[in-house]
């Protein structure tokens, strides 16, 4: 199994959100008896040789026995998590996902890694919407992200024009995930019931 793990990219799970819309820590909400974050980690651990968690609540995830890092700059949302992840990983790139995505697809993730070549970022794009939290970012994106932070702009996609991005479009995603379930995340209890 270990021979099949991606060695030059770290898996990074962002679990720093306050889950305001959900009302409690959604990462620990169970889907068919398994917490969302454990579902995410199960997939990530089967793809990457190294998986870390970015969280400002490390005590809630200590039972997972994985390396955890708090945001270097708190209060920036997902951008802060990506910035921190890129700072702390030893690999040249990280594959970043949110902790509340119960339908990650191993084959799609591997494909995204395989097509990165020299791109600074590899990002799925569905119906014009960029899936910035199911994407690869190279460490060399740090400077542009820092520029964004310094300009008080905290939307991840705002630094894309400054770097080389390889978009993975719908026809490519459909080969692995025809219903685009990989990108579904859970923000409210009623969404969980629907899933």
Image (spheres, rainbow, N blue to C red):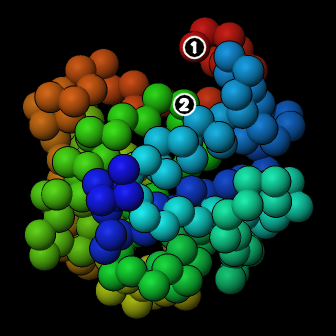
User: Answer yes or no: do the residues labelled 2 and 1 have beta carbons within 8 Å?
Assistant: yes
**Residue 43 located left or right of residue 2:** right
**Residue 23 located left or right of residue 141:** right
Residue pictured at 52% horizontal, 85% vertical: 87
Give the x, y percent position of residue 187: 66, 32
Quadrant that contains the C terminus: top right
Using a 10 Å C-alpha cutoff, classify the residue at mark 1 as few (fewer than 14 neighbours), some (14 to 19) or many (20 or more).
few
Q: Does 92 sit above or below residue 179? A: below
Residue pictured at 31% horizontal, 47% vertical: 109
Using a 10 Å C-alpha cutoff, classify the residue at mark 2 as few (fewer than 14 neighbours), some (14 to 19) or many (20 or more).
many
What number is the disc on residue 140?
none
* Image-quadrant location for residue 122: bottom left
Q: Does 80 sit above or below residue 91? A: above
Which of 81/159 is in front?
Answer: 81
Give the x, y percent position of residue 10: 43, 68
Q: Residue tagged by mark 1?
A: 195
Q: Secondary structure at mark 2?
A: loop
Q: Does the rendering let one see residue 79?
A: no
Looking at the image, how many numbered discs can be counted on the residues?
A: 2
Residue pictured at 49% horizontal, 51% vertical: 45
Q: Does 103 sit above or below residue 134? A: above
Q: Residue tagged by mark 2?
A: 102
**Residue 123 located left or right of residue 119:** right
Residue pictured at 39% horizontal, 25% vertical: 181
């Amino acid at each position: 199994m270990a021979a099949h793990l991606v060695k030059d990219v770290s898996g990074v799970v962002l679990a720093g959100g306050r889950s305001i819309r959900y009302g409690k820590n959604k990462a620990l909400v169970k889907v068919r008896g398994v917490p969302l974050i454990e579902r995410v980690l199960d997939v990530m651990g089967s793809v990457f040789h190294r998986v870390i968690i970015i969280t400002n609540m490390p005590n809630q995830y200590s039972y997972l026995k994985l390396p955890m890092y708090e945001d270097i700059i708190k209060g920036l949302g997902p951008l802060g998590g990506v910035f921190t992840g890129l700072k702390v990983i030893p690999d040249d790139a990280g594959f970043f996902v949110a902790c509340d995505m119960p339908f990650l697809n191993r084959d799609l993730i591997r494909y995204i890694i395989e097509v990165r070549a020299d791109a600074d970022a590899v990002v799925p794009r569905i119906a014009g919407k960029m899936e910035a939290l199911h994407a690869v970012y190279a460490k060399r994106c740090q400077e542009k992200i820092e520029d964004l932070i310094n300009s008080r702009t905290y939307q991840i996609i705002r630094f894309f024009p400054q770097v080389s991005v390889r978009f993975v479009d719908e026809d490519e995603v459909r080969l692995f995930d025809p219903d685009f379930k990989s990108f579904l995340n859970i923000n409210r209890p009623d969404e969980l019931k629907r899933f």
